[in-house]
Amino acid sequence: MKTPALVVGLCLLTLVSTRVTTAAATQTGSLNQPAGAAAPLTLETPHERDARMKWWRDARFGMFIHWGLYAIPAGEWKGKTDHAEWIRESAKIPLEEYNQFLGQFNPVKFNPAEWSRLAHRAGMKYLVITSKHHDGFALWDSKASDFDVMATPFKRDILKELSAACRKQNVRFCTYHSIMDWHHPDYLPRRTWEKSTRSADGADFDRFRGYLKSQLAEIVRGYNPGVMWFDGEWEATWTHAMGEDLDDYVRGLNKKIIINNRVDKGRHGMAGQTREGGFRGDFGTPEQEIPDQGIPGVDWESCMTMNAHWGWNAADTKWKSTEDLVRKLIDIASKGGNFLLNIGPRPDGTFPDQAVERLEGIGRWMDKNSSSIYGTHASPIGKPAWGRCTQKELGKGKTRLYLHVFDWPNDGQLVVTGINGTPIKAALLDGGDKLKFTQNAGGLTIEVPAKPKDTMTTVITLDITKPKTGI
Ligand code: H79
């Protein structure tokens, strides 16, 4: 809902309050920069940066939520069923026609307590919801826009209710906010197919940037997201200088906030890591893929759908299995990354049944095995032939390796290579049964039960005293 006086006030505010947290490069060794990259741009020390990133690094697992007007057509338009959150663009729906979804958005079964409960049940430590996707629709009571949830029959501030519910469940509330905007008259460029019907005369991209900042100020001040997850930065109108300015602005609103690399122009395609060259952003954003290996000292998060679409698509049957999702989480953790797993809620406000089933299944595995995920670091032994490995410091020179066995050995002998330290103890993580082991020139052999305890993935802990260098 729009309040013109306030909009003007906020816009003026944005003009004077940008340079707060960052300045010219003065520090070295920030963890968000690959070796050889330009010095980091923020004024924080590496220690301060580590403190800011700590909750996110420890979390390892979050829920993405793509929800908005596009849930209503459920991916279908004029007989084609492969659309989703991009439907206005992919089905070339004129703005006036798309706006009619406003009158139909009434998710009477929206239950924020249930959403945050399900995230918590799955073992997710944070939740990132689309405050605004590319279609420009705001899921909260936006003072800067009439294209928001208050213009629908629902008239409830979704971000307000969900952020409060998340706080109760100890799930960190975060927001995704698209830079690209197919609704705001000042956003440029117009889609090629609507150029002739939707004039760009008088459109002013700098004014759009003021609008973007007004909305971001509302979100940061109103709902305190732990992460601001930008997207749509690839458009030619968005520049590196604008990315720096926006990063400064949002960090100025909350200096502890974490911002993804799509605020700037440094993203390396869908692989998502930040290119060298002093780009902003606290973490890389591989989309629908998992890197072959992590990069030491670089923070990243793979975001992925459970089926084949981000927004709700009723015809989509390509659901990944629970086992596949658990193993993706493990694979990502073993490479030092986070996993942001998406849900596309239905227009009535409920999660798809298949999604609920998978969240509960992942939660059952996490009940027994989450200590092999939370607060862990990348594998010190690469990708073993039988699965994946994560690690955690135990103090006093000791390290715990979590051996995630994807391919259970038929002969009951699990061979672990690449360890020079002294093994102290091997055990099943679930239940704690101790396992015998022997060490010889070929590596360390752990005697494991004939059958895996958990068919999705059984985890073995291996505590070692570390050698002077390496593992
Ligand atoms: O919100 C979900 C999608 O709607 C959104 N991102 C996720 C999290 C998304 N928008 N676009 N895409 C995904 C795919 C777009 C890919 C491309 Fe590109 C944009 C191809 C060319 C421009 C990526 C960015 C590859 C090069 C630049």
Image (spheres, helix red, strand yellow):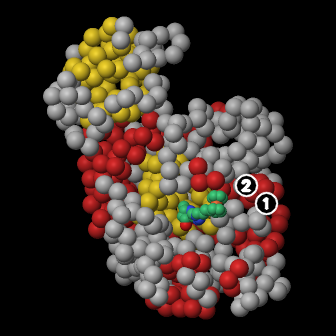
Q: Is 198 located above or below residue 307 in the figure?
A: below
In which quarter of the view is residue 32 placed?
top right
> What is the crowding at mark 2: few (fewer than 14 residues within 10 Å), some, or many (at least 20)?
many
Residue 377, position as x, y percentages in the image: 48, 32
- Residue 412, label in figure: none
Please tell me in which quarter of the rendered image ligand 1 is found. bottom right
Looking at mark 1, is its residue's CB closer than 8 Å to ligand 1? no
Residue on which the image places disc 1: 239
Residue at left 24%, top 28%?
A: 409
Proximity of marks 1 and 2: CB atoms separated by less than 8 Å: yes
**Res. 7 in view:** no
In the rendered view, does 410 fall on the left or right side of 342?
left
Q: Is 430 located above or below residue 155 in the figure?
A: above
Identify the secondary structure beneath mark 2: loop
Observer-nearest of 379 and 349? 379
Q: Which is nearer the N-term, disc 1 or disc 2?
A: 1
Residue at left 62%, top 85%?
A: 146
**Res. 231 in view:** yes
Observer-nearest of 288 and 223? 288
**Residue type, numbered disc 2:** Lys
Furthest residue in direction left, as rendered? 450
Observer-nearest of 337 and 197? 197
In the rendered view, does 447 fall on the left or right side of 314?
left
**Residue type, numbered disc 1:** Thr
Residue at left 69%, top 62%?
A: 233
Furthest residue in direction top, as rendered? 441
Estimate the spatial distance between the alpha carbons at disc 1 and disc 2, rounded to whole Å. 7 Å
Residue on which the image places disc 2: 265
Residue 408, position as x, y percentages in the image: 25, 32
**Quarter of the image where the N terminus is located:** bottom right
Identify the secondary structure beneath mark 1: loop
Residue 275, position as x, y percentages in the image: 70, 45
